[in-house]
Image: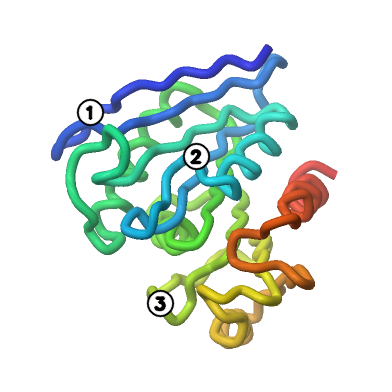
């Protein structure tokens, strides 16, 4: 059975509620860091898109790390518009890279978490990334690697598709547009699972 541990990781501003999950195979194939949606709009690391990303990586042998952003759950602090959240992820990534050295690094983010992971990658580059519901137009999403898997819902009412297409066009990136999907991919979560499986593990 996969191993799961919820603990408080100490940062300079206070504790960060962190969840690590280990696959049921050894050795692990990669470290996957998965960021949740906007903390001021109900986003937590238990969000269904975030969970789908986690279970997909876990099923394929990755060590998976999630964290509640500042002010969410038992995480200390308050919303910091992406700057503090980026700093927190960089601290966690540095810690777990030392704990699990020489593994490929994967980043995954949903909505606000996608923006944060784009910023994290500017400082601590990953080997591969998946962004879902990327909040272009709402936040200054950074350029990401050419091999990034970008998934967006055709009917996303929170982050409409046109600004995401503009961002992708500027950076010459491809987007997987899921027909009929809203922002939270209701009844379409398996599409996220299948695309991650195909692009990361096939």
Mark 1 surroundings: few (<14), some (14-19) or many (≥20) residues within 10 A: some
> Which residue position is annotated with label 2?
46
Q: Residue 10, which numbered label? A: 1
> Which residue position is annotated with label 3?
138
Position of residue 193 in the picture relative to residue 6 (left or right): right
Q: Nearer the viewer, residue 86 or 189?
A: 189
Tag nearer the camera, 1 or 3:
3
Tag nearer the camera, 1 or 2:
2
What's the colour scheme?
A: rainbow
Mark 2 surroundings: few (<14), some (14-19) or many (≥20) residues within 10 A: some
Position of residue 160 in the picture relative to residue 81 (left or right): right
Tag nearer the camera, 2 or 3:
2
Q: Residue at x 76, y 68 (%)?
A: 178
Sooner in the amino-acid sequence: mark 1 or mark 3: 1
SS label for mark 1:
strand
SS label for mark 2:
loop
Q: How many marks on residues?
A: 3
Q: Residue at x 59, y 40 (%)?
A: 51
Spot occupied by residue 73 in the image (x, y as percentages of width and height): 31, 37
Residue farthest along the top direction in this orientation: 1
Quarter-of-image position of residue 26: top right
Spot occupied by residue 164 in the image (x, y as percentages of width and height): 57, 79
Spot occupied by residue 181 in the image (x, y as percentages of width and height): 71, 67
Q: Residue at x 41, y 26 (%)?
A: 98
Sooner in the amino-acid sequence: mark 2 or mark 3: 2
SS label for mark 3:
loop
Q: In the rendered structure, are the residues bearing label 1 and label 2 in contact, judged by CB atoms less than 8 Å apart?
A: no
Q: Quadrant of the N terminus?
A: top right
Give the Cα separation between the discs numbered 2 and 3.
23 Å
Q: Nearer the viewer, residue 69 or 184?
A: 184
């Amino acid at each position: 059975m996969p191993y799961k541990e919820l603990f408080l990781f100490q940062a300079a501003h206070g504790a960060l509620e962190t969840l690590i999950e280990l696959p049921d195979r050894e050795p692990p194939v990669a470290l996957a860091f998965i960021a949740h949606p906007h903390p001021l709009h109900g986003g937590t690391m238990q969000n269904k898109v975030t969970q789908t990303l986690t279970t997909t990586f876990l099923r394929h042998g990755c060590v998976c790390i999630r964290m509640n952003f500042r002010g969410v759950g038992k995480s200390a602090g308050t919303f910091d518009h992406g700057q503090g959240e980026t700093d927190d992820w960089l601290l966690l990534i540095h810690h777990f890279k030392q704990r699990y050295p020489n593994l490929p690094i994967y980043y995954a983010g949903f909505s606000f978490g996608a923006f944060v992971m784009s910023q994290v990658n500017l400082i601590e580059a990953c080997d591969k990334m998946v962004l879902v519901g990327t909040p272009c137009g709402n936040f200054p999403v950074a350029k990401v690697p050419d091999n990034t898997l970008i998934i967006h819902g055709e009917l996303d009412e929170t982050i409409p598709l046109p600004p995401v297409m503009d961002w992708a066009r500027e950076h010459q990136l491809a987007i997987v547009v899921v027909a009929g999907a809203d922002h939270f991919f209701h009844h379409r979560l398996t599409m996220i699972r299948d695309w991650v499986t195909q692009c990361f593990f096939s």
